[in-house]
Structure formats: C-alpha cells, structure tokens
Image (cartoon, helix red, strand yellow):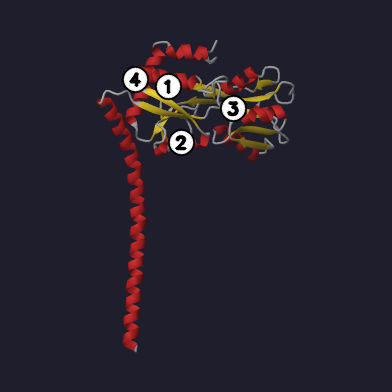
Amino acid sequence: MKKSTLILLAGLTALSLAACGSSSSETTAAAETEAAAEGAETEAAAETEAAAEESGETPVYTVVTNATFPPFDTLDAETGAITGFDMDLIAAIGEDQGFDVEFVDMAFESLIPAVQTGSGDIIAAGMWAGDPERQAQVDFSDIYYTDGSALLVKADNESITSMDSLTTDMKVATQIATNYADDLQAMVDEGKLGEVVILDGFDTCVLQVQNGDVDAMMAGLSIVNAYMQRNPDTLKVVGDEDTYEDLGFAVQKGNTELLEKINAGLANVMENGVYDELLVKWGLAVD
C-alpha cells in the first residue's frame, strides 16, 4: 500500500514539474514569437519596397490620417476626398522621391497602431513629433511645420480672452489622444479648469462650442483658424502662442529606408519652392 502511494506521488510530482516547465516554455515561446512578428513586419515592408523598385514599379505607400484637422487634414466639401496641406506635402515628397501615395481616413487613436501593424506606411495627421510616448512607438521625420496652441470660442464670448482666463466653472473640448487633452487634464488636476471634454474629432468639438455644450475648444492655431474661417460670424479665436508644437510625419519603428526618403524629399521641396506654394495654398504662410 505504501509502495503504491509513493509511486503515485512520484508520478504526480513528475507531472507537476512537466506542467511548470511547459508553462515557462510557452511563455518564453510566446515572447519570442511576438518579437519575431514585429521584426518580420518591418522586414516584410522593406522587402516589398525593394521588390517594387527592382521590378521598375512605382512603390505605393498607404498614408493614414484623421481628416478633422483643417487645413492639414480634412475632407473636400464637394467630393468627400481626403485633402489638406499634409496630403499635398507628402504627395509632393513622393513625386520627388519616386513613390505614390494613397490616403486612408481613420480615428486618430488608430493611426499609430495602423503603422505598427503594417496596415499603414506613413502617418500624415498634423501629429506632434515631440511626444516621448509617440517617439517610443514610431519614428518621426524631420519637422515640417511648427504650430501654436489656441482656443476657439463663440463670437459673443467675452469671458475667455486667453488660456489664463479659463476658470474652474468652464468646460473645454479637444480631440482624443492629443497633447491638448493631456494639457487640459493637467489644468483640471491643478484646479485651473472645471472639465475637459474628450471627443473623437475636432469637428465634433466645434459643434459642441456652437451648441453651447462647452465653453471652448483647444487645438493648434492653424486648426482653430481654419474652423473660424468657415464660421466667421459665430466663432472666434483667442489665446496666445506661448506654446508651440513641432509637426512631423511618422513611419514604423526601424523603417529607415522610408524615413530617409521622406526627409530627403522634404528637404528638396522646401528648397525648390513647392513647400512655400503649399503654405500659401492652405493659408499657412506667415505674412
């Protein structure tokens, strides 16, 4: 009887150790598989680019954006096509560097995951390139525009005259996954603002201002100016340009070949005058 018990216990112990070893092996294997998958995505993208170039075909890159950032990224009122300064600029860069682009509109918070998984190649969305969290997830190009923050309010609003005039009984809207959301939340935490309202797009934020659901919208100066110009009788821009953002295009981490093309093309269009023409076209030229 004792001998049988000992044999049974030994068997159970062996099974337990085998199970533990299997679990550890599975965890290690899963981690290795994930790392390999990430490396494979970058390698696959590079191989696709190389194959297109070798065959003489013009590479076509998928440019993902969130088309609620006029004048950088927006939708044509008549055709519904994705258009804007970013679209024209990356297309000009592509023409200079020998590649074509196709545009896909999606939620702002989906842009980085799209590039990380390879469903998008380039982010062109008026994205702040100075965010350390974003820098850890994607690689940014050289800076193509620097923009200041501002507020959009109703034309008859006399209580908001600058960022400092915001109070604890006010609500300010902005878009999800932006540094504006972080800045406004910090103001709430510091007791300088009543509430930050985070919405899916700046276009929705504008509607909230017009309807009186919030007191103001915070965004880049160029963005709020564009919305104000569409509604000059009902909206106005206030605030000072005491904070600035450097905007850049983004690609998948490690895709140095594409990043170098973008940077080289950007330098060329800045030098040959195309960049300045686009600034004028989209109302971004400094007088």
- Which secondary structure, mark 2? helix
Callout in the foreground (1, 3): 1
Q: Quadrant of the N terminus?
A: bottom left
Q: Specify the quadrant of the image occupied by residue 27.
A: bottom left
Q: Which residue is mark 1?
A: 90
Q: Specify the quadrant of the image occupied by residue 166.
A: top right
Q: Residue at x 46, y 36 (%)?
A: 112
Label 1–label 2 contact, CB within 8 A: no
Q: Which residue is mark 4?
A: 97
Could you tell me how far apart the alpha carbons at marks 1 and 4 are, in whole angstroms?
10 Å
- Using the image, determine if residue 24 lies above or below residue 214: below
Which of these two is toward me, 33 or 83? 83
Callout in the foreground (2, 3): 2
Q: Position of residue 15 (x, y in %)?
A: 34, 71
Could you tell me how far apart the alpha carbons at marks 1 and 2 are, in whole angstroms?
17 Å
Q: Position of residue 253 (x, y in %)?
A: 38, 35
- Mark 2 surroundings within 10 Å by alpha-carbon count, few (fewer than 14), some (14 through 19), many (20 or more): many
Q: Which residue is mark 2?
A: 112
